[in-house]
Image (tube, helix red, strand yellow):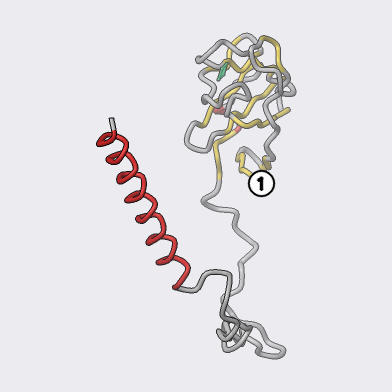
């Protein structure tokens, strides 16, 4: 039985030695202890960018603020009255509970994060475990979800619906 004990001790010692070597390796390269000689040159030194400090006349390439082009999510005609449309890529569902009244909610189910699958019979339905949310306010109609779908901001301009 002695050889076994010796072997085990040897293994343990070898393991301890490895750990000691590793610890020493880490410690010698600038751990938190010991030498206070290192100056740590990480001050707010030479990264002072001018940040376009031109006085007065700003650059001519400012935001145009005239055309909201390109960001339109959908059009009002694509969202059925009493229903809604799911935009999986944007993870948004836009509903129109009554004519001209548009709402938007996150399409991520608050139960376990599936993307909702359809809008039907006044509810936004999750295919994963059957949760249903009201198209009017995102509140839970049927669990297992217990929290409503968070509202998303949209802007309706003419027949264009844009994520705010
Ligand atoms: Fe939607 Fe479970 S993730 S019901």
The spot of residue 45 in percent (x, y) is 60, 88
Residue that label 1 marks: 164
The residue nearer to you, when weighing 115 against 20, is 20
Q: Residue furthest front?
A: 2
- Which quadrant contains ligand 1? top right
Residue at image point 34% right, 43% down: 9
Q: Is mark 1 within 8 Å of ligand 1?
A: no
- Give the side of residue 61 with respect to residue 56, left or right: left
Closest to the observer, 21 or 8: 8
Are there few (<14), some (14-19), or many (20+) residues within 10 Å of tag 1?
Answer: few
Total count of labels? 1
Residue placed at 57% from the left, 86% from the top? 37
Quarter of the N terminus within the rendering: top left
Camera sees residue 98? no
- Residue 142's x, y, as percent? 67, 9
Query: Could you tell me if residue 23 is visible in this image?
Result: yes
């Amino acid at each position: 039985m002695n050889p076994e004990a010796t072997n085990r001790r040897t293994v343990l010692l070898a393991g301890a030695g490895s750990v000691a070597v590793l610890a020493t390796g880490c410690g010698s390269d600038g751990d938190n202890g010991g030498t206070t000689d290192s100056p740590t040159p990480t001050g707010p030194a030479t990264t002072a960018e001018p940040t376009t400090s031109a006085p007065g006349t700003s650059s001519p390439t400012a935001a145009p603020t005239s055309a909201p082009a390109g960001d339109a999510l959908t059009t009002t005609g694509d969202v059925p009255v009493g229903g809604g449309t799911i935009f999986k890529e944007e993870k948004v569902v836009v509903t129109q509970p009554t004519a001209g009244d548009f709402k938007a909610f996150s399409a991520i189910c608050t139960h376990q994060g599936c993307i909702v699958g359809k809008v039907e019979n006044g509810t936004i339905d999750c295919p994963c475990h059957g949760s249903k949310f009201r198209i009017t306010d995102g509140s839970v109609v049927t669990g297992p979800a217990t929290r409503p779908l968070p509202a998303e901001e949209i802007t309706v301009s003419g027949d264009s619906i844009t994520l705010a």
